Amino acid sequence: MENRKIRKIILNAVSVIIAVVLLFPLYWMLVTSLKFEADIFKSHPSLFPERIFVDSYVSQLGSGQYNMFRSFFNSAVISVSVLVISTILSIPAAYGLARFRFYGKKLFILLFLVTQMLPAVFVLTPLFIIFNKTGILYTYLSPIIADCTIGIPFSVLILRTYFLSIPKELDDSAKIDGCNHFTAFLRIMVPIAYPGVIVAAVFSFLFAWGDLVYGMTFINKQEMRPITAGIFNFMGQYGIAWNYLMAFGVVTILPVVLIFIFMQKYIISGLTNGAVKG
């Protein structure tokens, strides 16, 4: 009993140390954003800001060229659109791959896996040509569709394993009650699979929110670019404004932090429940 307590204390201490190490870069980014530039480059930097510098945040809230609200809005439009499109399309696709047998099913699953291994730059040129020919280049629609090429395959793979973990007897019970495949899917399967749906939706949003290459390539107007592209505003010819850059980074990761704080229960449940079968 005593050994168990000692082991528990050691594991808790190790967990705290690992958490501190992993979270320290985020803390340092926040502290740097609140420092004067002269304090950042001291030979012995402090863990706390000696003087609070808030202009790094205030100057980006106005109506200037680098308006944080505008960049935040652009990212929100793109990310929410990717979330909706990816979730709506991946749910029936995952259900079909999990429940029905058809020729080429394994090939479809393999192709979805392959798309997760390809870097974004591999499809950059083909997508650029397609968007240019269809007339949607340099609009919000081009990065939305490009981000969906990442979000949809991932969501299908996650949701397929989740649907596989649901007993097929529920389908048979729904058919006995008068449901067909479509109504059983909407009324029975989707409500049961909501933790997996939340996981797919959250990660689709995060893929789009953290995207840089598509936002920089397919949108040429500064006022339309997402918040990740706005980081380059502070990398000038004569140096980098580190306090402004870190303030922009704090605002960029804020939605991600809030999502994991308030939805971690659903995310963990969706990932663990969907890992029962492959």
Image (cartoon, rainbow, N blue to C red):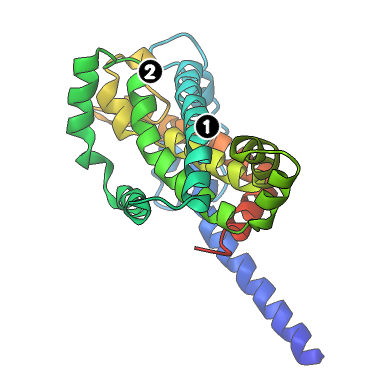
What residue is at 39 percent from the left and 26 percent from the top?
144
Count of marks placed on residues: 2
Q: Position of residue 129 (x, y in %)?
A: 17, 24
In the image: residue 156, left or right of residue 104: right
Compared to 101, does 233 lie above or below?
above
Farthest right residue in view: 1
**Image quadrant where residue 234 sits:** top left
Q: Position of residue 100 (x, y in %)?
A: 49, 50
**Image quadrant where residue 64 sits:** top left
Disc 2, SS: loop
Would residue 19 be visible to someone looking at this image? yes
**Residue closest to the eye, 177 or 121:** 177
Q: Residues under labels 2 and 1: Cα distance?
A: 19 Å
**Image quadrant where residue 1 sits:** bottom right
Q: Position of residue 14 (x, y in %)?
A: 61, 73
* Disc 2: which residue: 140
**Residue closest to the eye, 22 or 119:** 119
What residue is at 53 percent from the left and 48 percent from the top?
159
What residue is at 47 percent from the left and 8 percent from the top?
63
Q: Position of residue 269 (x, y in %)?
A: 66, 54
Q: Amino acid at mark 2?
A: Tyr
**Residue closest to the eye, 152 or 92:** 92
* Disc 1: which residue: 88
Q: Residues within 10 Å of mark 1 (few under 14, many from 20)?
A: some
